[in-house]
Image: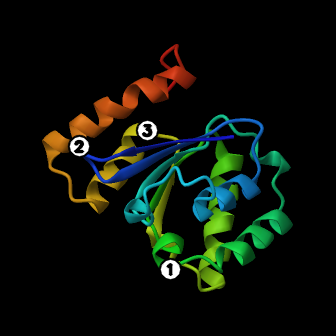
């Protein structure tokens, strides 16, 4: 399941994945099948919070199939910068593998994203990409913080 909010004042999408989750949901989201995303915001940078997803079920074949589908999308969507917020080394490895496949398939460059377990690092990556000032970066961090703490209420974020 994917939850989405576009943060207009920062020009950034916030996407949170929860179980049940699969890559087909990501593809349908990118297609904007339900029309929930304003077309002019497609291709804008995103924070993709995957910390509540069990990535151990996702195989290399699933990733390749997803990349083949993704290759049909507009270049602005394929190359949008994404800060991946993940939980644990297996999730980091899986996302890195997916980004490597995307680069090898000519879909995007691996430098169009960052992968981290650190919420502050993810915010800094996005702030740099959209050229936020220090004050705006603090405001973005504070705006997203309730969503981050909702998943990890005991200070583990």
Q: Which residue is mark 1?
A: 75
Residue 78 image position (x, y, % from top left): 54, 73
* C-alpha distance separating marks 2 and 1: 27 Å
Indicate which label's residue lies in the foreground, 3 or 1. Answer: 1
Q: Is residue 6 left or right of residue 115?
A: left
* In contact (CB < 8 Å): disc 3 and disc 2: no
Q: Is residue 41 left or right of residue 35?
A: left
The correct choice, above or below, for 90 with respect to 106 in the image is: above
The correct choice, above or below, for 97 with respect to 134 in the image is: below
Q: Which residue is mark 3?
A: 119
Q: Nearer the viewer, residue 127 or 117?
A: 127
* C-alpha distance separating marks 3 and 2: 12 Å
Residue 126 image position (x, y, % from top left): 35, 54
Q: Is residue 121 left or right of residue 102?
A: left
Q: Which residue is mark 2?
A: 137
Q: Residue furthest top?
A: 154
Identity of the residue drawn at 30% across and 47% down:
8
Q: Quadrant of residue 93?
A: bottom right
Q: Is residue 142 left or right of residue 29?
A: left
Which mark is first along the chain, 2 or 3?
A: 3
The correct choice, above or below, for 145 with respect to 140 in the image is: above
Which mark is first along the chain, 1 or 2?
A: 1
Identity of the residue drawn at 65% across and 79% down:
71
Q: Quadrant of the N terminus?
A: top right
Residue 39 image position (x, y, % from top left): 44, 63
| Circle 3: element type | helix
Crowd band around label 3 with a 10 angstrom C-alpha radius: few (<14), some (14–19), many (20+)? some
* In contact (CB < 8 Å): disc 2 and disc 1: no
The correct choice, above or below, for 30 with respect to 102 in the image is: above
Q: Nearer the viewer, residue 114 or 75?
A: 75
Identity of the residue drawn at 63% across and 58% down:
33
Residue 36 image position (x, y, % from top left): 52, 49
């Amino acid at each position: 399941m994917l939850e989405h909010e576009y943060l207009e004042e920062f020009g950034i999408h916030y996407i949170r994945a929860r179980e049940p989750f699969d890559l087909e949901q990501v593809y349908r989201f990118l297609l904007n099948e339900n029309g929930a995303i304003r077309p002019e915001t497609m291709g804008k940078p995103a924070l993709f919070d995957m910390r509540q997803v069990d990535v151990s079920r996702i195989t290399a074949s699933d990733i390749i199939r997803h990349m083949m589908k993704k290759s049909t999308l507009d270049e602005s969507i394929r190359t949008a910068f994404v800060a991946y917020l993940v939980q644990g080394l297996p999730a980091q490895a899986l996302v890195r593998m997916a980004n490597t496949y995307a680069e090898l398939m000519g879909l995007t460059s691996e430098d169009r994203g960052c992968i981290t377990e650190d919420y502050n690092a993810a915010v800094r990556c996005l702030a740099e990409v959209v050229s936020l000032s220090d004050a705006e970066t603090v405001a973005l961090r504070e705006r997203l913080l309730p969503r981050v703490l909702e998943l990890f209420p005991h200070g583990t974020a």
